[in-house]
Amino acid sequence: MDLNVDSHLAAVERSVSSLERDGQPARAVTLARTYATTVEDLWDAVTNADRIPRWFLPVSGDLELGGSYKFEGNAGGTITHCEPPSLLGLTWEFGGDVSWVEVRLAQDGVGRARLALTHTALLSDHWSEFGPGAVGVGWEMGLLGMELHLTRPGEPKIDAQTFHLTPEGKALHIGSSEAWGEAAIAAGTDAETARAAAGRTTAFYTGEPPA
């Protein structure tokens, strides 16, 4: 697949913040990207069970406020907020852990809509090992999938099982991991610690040992 790696990496805004959730220390990873579509169309792509697999993963469940959902081979949870066409909130339950995802949509100029996703997780050993890239890289690939769904609807979706083996996929995973390391530094994490975590994130996604 022909992809401009630098362009896709530059299209994503990334930030990390520290907070408390349920009285415990937590970290919030936020990423945003603007698309050449309307807020209504973007909302439909985010919430329509027929469209979600075209850019992300097959999904099942009761996709309405208070309902449960399950992404094939990945997380499930409960839909906690649903305010069309601007706010979707849900729990993200995977491997016995619970975290929280919030998606906000807004108009960003004529014919453009902005998607901002925040994933909040309690501070853990997993965070210490991988930093914000633990969730940031995966979501960033999802936002790439959305871009391709909206601009190249006739093309096959990226194969998540093999994409990291392609030159473009490897470059995107490395670039995203490094960018999340820099976002962690901007949020106050020691540079050596943040870049080491980014290296482990790169190794996880590419299958190659960290440098």
Image (tube, rainbow, N blue to C red):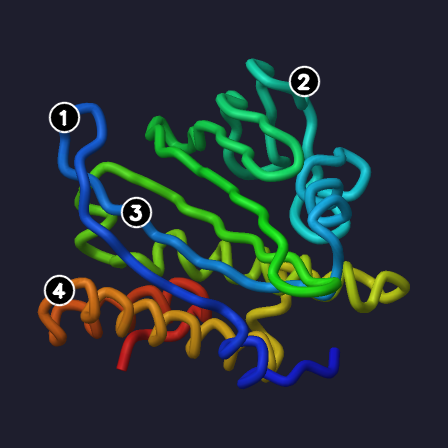
Vertical comparison of 92 with 114: above or below: above
Identify which residue is drawn at 50% across, 54% down. Answer: 139
Neighbour tally class for label 2: few under 14, some 14-19, many 20 plus, Cα within 10 Å: some
Helix, strand or loop at label 3? It is strand
Q: Which residue is mark 2?
A: 62
Which callout, 1 or 3, points at the residue further toward the start of the chain?
1
Give the residue type that dot 1 points to.
Gly
Crowd class of label 1 (few under 14; some 14 to 19; many from 20; radius 10 Å)? few
Work out whether mark 4 precedes mark 1 in sequence or the reverse, and give the earlier one. 1
Residue labelled with disc 4 = 188
Number of the front mark, 1 or 2 = 1
Tell me how far mark 1 sits from mark 3, CA to CA: 15 Å
Pointer 1: what residue?
Answer: 23
Left or right of 91 on screen, residue 111:
right
Of circles 2 and 3, which is in front?
3
- Camera-side residue of 138 and 48: 48
Task: Return the residue nearer the eye: 10 or 52.
Answer: 10
| Nearer-N-terminus badge (1/2) | 1
Residue for badge 3:
28
Element carrying mark 1: loop
Q: CA distance from mark 2 to mark 3?
A: 27 Å
